[in-house]
Amino acid sequence: MNNVYLINKPEGLTSFDVVRKVKGVLKEKRIGHTGTLDPFATGLLIICTGRFTRLADYFHRYLKTYRAIFVLGAFTDTDDVTGRVLKKFDIPLLTSESLISVLNGFKGEIEQIPPLISAKKINGNRLYKLNRNGVQVKAKSTKVLVQDINLLAFNPPEFEVEITCGTGTYIRSIARDTGEKLGCGCYVKGLKRLSIGPYSVENAFLPESAKPISHLDILPDLEAFVLQERDLKRIMMGNEVLIKGIECTGGVVRVFTPYFKELVSICRCVNNKDGVKLKPLKVFKGEL
């Protein structure tokens, strides 16, 4: 079945552990998630089944919001609480204002080096596999987007932040880099993903209770079209269709069966003098 599930990932499970649990519950053969959460982290994990596993790239467009607890005073080899302490420091006298000033330096498009223990690939190999096998490999810095970062609470040596960022941003790296800027070390103690684009963890289910969202709620920022049977069949065969007498906002749109019951395709939408031309980019349904 083609469906999308909002899962509230428990602490201690890898993202693939969660996928396996949901796979067992749903008895689905084709299943995958749209973005990894570290084992110690909790919160929203989006899982797709059937042909909707091909939607992952569209979910990657969305900003993600996290709530994290950072701890000052040490660096660890994983940049989080699960790692081995590399070095301890005395914590300087800090005010909330001075900490906010440091955090604000991460806003915008920044260069970031992924943690040594991460899913980042180097020459086809995951960093966590390379570095846990004793090979010290450091990834190159990459550009990431931090749209917002707010200090929620400051109780030294801990402080709580909420961060909204783009795909590929490592919260652990922000903690590590905060420690470097302050000269006292820093790592992540707790991490929860609150949202991915329009989807909130408040609407998510535990893996064993997975329930699909409605097809109309999949990628709701994209314009939606309902087509007649003749045009739907053409779309399902991968052919363009012309819908006369209407306009679209342009770009990428969703195509549904009547009453928005099933998402059939993601199409490129182009306006012309006669109406709207829809060109299939991804097709999820083979027959009506």
Image (tube, grey):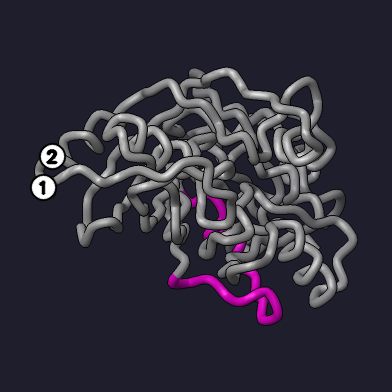
Q: Which of 175 and 86 is in front in this view?
A: 86
Above-or-below relation of 280 to 48:
above
Q: What element carries label 2?
A: helix
Count neighbours of disc 2 (C-alpha within 10 A) and say few if under 14, some if 14 to 19, many if 20 or more: few
- Residue 226 position within the rendered picture, expressed as x and y whole percent measured from the top left: 59, 51
Q: What element carries label 1?
A: loop
Q: What residue type is labelled 1?
A: Thr
Q: Which of 143 and 191 is in front in this view?
A: 191
Q: In this view, does 224 lie to the left or right of 197?
A: right
Residue at coordinates 15% horizontally, 45% vertically from top-left?
94
Marks 1 and 2, Cα distance to the nearest angstrom? 5 Å
Q: Mark number for residue 95?
A: 1
Residue at coordinates 33% horizontally, 37% vertically from top-left?
178
- Residue 96 position within the rendered picture, expressed as x and y whole percent measured from the top left: 13, 49
Q: Nearer the viewer, residue 91 or 222?
A: 91
Dot 1 and dot 2 residues touching (CB under 8 Å):
yes
Q: Quadrant of residue 267?
A: top right
Above-or-below relation of 247 to 77:
above
Q: Mark number for residue 98?
A: 2
Q: In this view, does 76 lie to the left or right of 36?
A: left
Residue at coordinates 66% horizontally, 33% vertically from top-left?
120
Residue at coordinates 41% horizontally, 45% vertically from top-left?
88
Q: Quadrant of residue 30?
A: bottom right
- Residue 154 position within the rendered picture, expressed as x and y whole percent measured from the top left: 20, 58
Q: In the picture, which quadrant includes the C terminus?
A: bottom right
Q: What residue type is labelled 2?
A: Ser
Give the magenta part as a residue range: 202-220
Question: How many marks do you count on the picture?
Answer: 2
Q: In the picture, which quadrant includes the N terminus?
A: bottom right
